[in-house]
């Protein structure tokens, strides 16, 4: 459970001078810690086992959460059609709570990872996710679904998400973008396969047994994930406490935090509403259900591609370009009202939006040392969670306006375009120069 804590060597300038043997001992310890942190395996059996575990973990967590578009359309049509208008209006809150709860616990989880305490939270999150999956078929009214699928699934996934991101950074540095891209590809595969499984099983065995079957699948996947998790570096008690507010003294990191919030106001909006909007546009529900899977599979391809490009040209440079294209696609989405057009825009949006999850770990990793990578990732992911919590419900208000989904597209797409410009501003602060790799 706990690895041995290796404190940072520190010499108090006000204390009495140490003898030569003591100085040599401190220098040796500092050198060993530094060398261990700088000598990344970039592969090997254990590294690939860990990476396979994170791929399966993302299959279960982000795979389930990013399938929300299927649930939203199904609940609107079948299960919650008898709910009050106010409850139907805030149905999207369930999906936004899921997305937010993945990120919000990241600050505490990331800090626990840094000091070596990660297995119990990870196992607890796995259990909570599976339990919530089995409880969803028992839900009857809106608040039941909010409790089980919003908070249960979200918090369970959140207790695992940051750990998986941070643990990959222990094994890869030069190939970190590619490794994180593969990890996130697992989430895209899950979000592609799970909606199809649900769609097929709901029509054959009904919604309750479809969810129970999915629960058994996630149970098997997460057992394997827990067995594969292993950090490489010894824990270090980095100064600054759980919040690590001194990190925000870095102007580039602070601007990146702002751009993360603004981008996440719109990042998941299209994925949330693309199924229900397609039905509203007159497209067959049988096809509309698969748009979520199409967008998620495209996102998976985009995550791996973005990871490779990020290693070659710089993570934040690629994030800037991909986020801008995804924002433009989101603005164009409500005007695509035929099957070929809405399929094409789903593919484009999915491919480009995938860059965020694939590269956020690389971007944050460049802004400090490896010893507190969990805390920095936690801070950024918590900010992302607040944006993900606010975005879809705000879009829901626009969806009920006179302009409908057109207003949703303008709001979400504009947020992503603004976020894209702020990413580049953060990059310029971190590495001045227009063509710099960063």
Image (cartoon, rainbow, N blue to C red):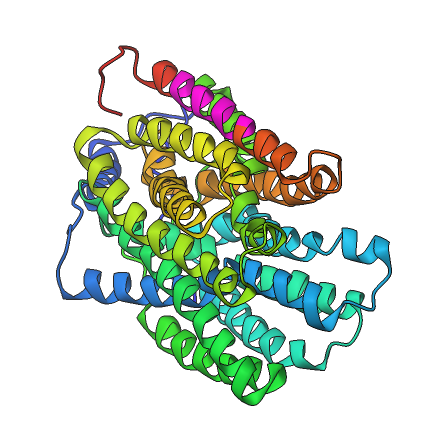
In terms of depth relative to the viewer, which is nearer, 96 or 248? 96
Q: Which residues are magenta?
A: 414-426
Does 121 appear above or below 319? Answer: below
Q: Residue at x 41, y 32 (%)?
A: 323
Q: Residue at x 66, y 61 (%)?
A: 150
Does 19 appear above or below 278? Answer: above
Does 162 appear above or below 189? Answer: above
Image quarter hosting the C terminus: top left
Q: Residue at x 38, y 31 (%)?
A: 325
Is residue 328 left or right of 104 when viewed as pictured?
left
Quarter-wise, where is residue 305 in the image? top left
Q: Position of residue 403 (x, y in %)?
A: 69, 34
Q: Position of residue 380 (x, y in %)?
A: 50, 37
In terms of depth relative to the viewer, which is nearer, 290 or 26? 290
In terms of depth relative to the viewer, which is nearer, 322 or 424? 322
Q: Position of residue 329 (x, y in %)?
A: 44, 35
In terms of depth relative to the viewer, which is nearer, 243 or 287? 287
Q: Residue furthest left?
A: 44
Does 302 appear above or below 24? Answer: below
Is residue 185 left or right of 326 when viewed as pictured?
left
In this orientation, does residue 247 appear? no
Magenta stretch: residue 423 in it?
yes
Q: Residue at x 51, y 45 (%)?
A: 337
Magenta stretch: residue 425 in it?
yes
Quarter-wise, where is residue 20 in the image? top left
Is residue 337 left or right of 222 when viewed as pictured?
right
Q: Tell how many labels.
A: 0
In this orientation, does residue 253 appear? yes
Q: Residue furthest top?
A: 433
Main SS, magenta residues: helix
């Amino acid at each position: 459970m706990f690895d041995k804590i290796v404190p940072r060597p520190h010499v108090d300038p006000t204390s009495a001078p140490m003898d030569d043997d003591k100085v040599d001992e401190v220098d040796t310890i500092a050198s060993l810690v530094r060398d261990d942190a700088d000598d990344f395996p970039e592969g090997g059996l254990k590294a690939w086992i860990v990476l396979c575990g994170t791929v399966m973990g993302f299959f279960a967590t982000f795979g389930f959460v990013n399938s929300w578009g299927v649930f939203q359309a199904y609940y609107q049509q079948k299960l919650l059609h008898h709910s009050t208008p106010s409850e139907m209006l805030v149905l999207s809150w369930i999906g936004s709570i899921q997305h937010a709860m993945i990120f919000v616990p990241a600050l505490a989880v990331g800090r626990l990872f840094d000091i070596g305490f990660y297995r119990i939270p990870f196992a607890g999150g796995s259990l909570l996710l599976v339990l919530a999956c089995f409880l969803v078929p028992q839900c009857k009214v809106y608040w039941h679904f909010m409790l089980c699928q919003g908070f249960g699934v979200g918090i369970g996934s959140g207790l695992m998400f940051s750990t998986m991101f941070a643990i990959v950074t222990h094994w890869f540095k030069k190939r970190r973008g590619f490794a994180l891209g593969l990890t996130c590809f697992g989430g895209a595969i899950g979000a592609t396969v799970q909606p199809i499984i649900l769609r097929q099983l709901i029509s054959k065995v009904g919604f309750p047994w479809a969810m129970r079957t999915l629960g058994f699948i996630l149970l098997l996947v997460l057992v394997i994930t827990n067995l594969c998790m292993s950090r490489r570096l010894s824990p270090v008690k980095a100064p600054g406490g759980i919040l690590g507010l001194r990190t925000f003294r870095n102007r580039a990191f602070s601007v990146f935090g702002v751009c993360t919030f603004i981008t996440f106001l719109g990042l998941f909006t299209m994925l949330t509403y693309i199924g229900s909007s397609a039905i509203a546009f007159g497209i067959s529900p049988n096809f509309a259900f698969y748009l979520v899977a199409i967008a998620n599979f495209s996102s998976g391809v985009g995550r791996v591609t973005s990871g490779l490009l990020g290693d070659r040209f710089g993570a934040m440079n690629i994030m800037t370009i991909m986020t801008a294209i995804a924002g433009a696609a989101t603005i164009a989405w409500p005007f695509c009202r035929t099957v070929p057009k809405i399929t094409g825009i789903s593919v484009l949006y999915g491919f480009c939006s995938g860059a965020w999850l694939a590269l956020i770990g690389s971007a944050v990793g460049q802004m400090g040392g490896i010893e507190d990578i969990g805390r920095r990732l936690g801070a950024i992911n918590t900010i992302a969670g607040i944006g993900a919590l606010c975005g879809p419900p705000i879009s829901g208000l626009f969806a009920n306006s006179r302009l409908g989904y057109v207003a949703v597209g303008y709001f979400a797409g504009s947020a992503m375009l603004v976020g894209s410009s702020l990413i580049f501003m953060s990059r310029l602060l971190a590495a001045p120069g227009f063509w710099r790799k960063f």
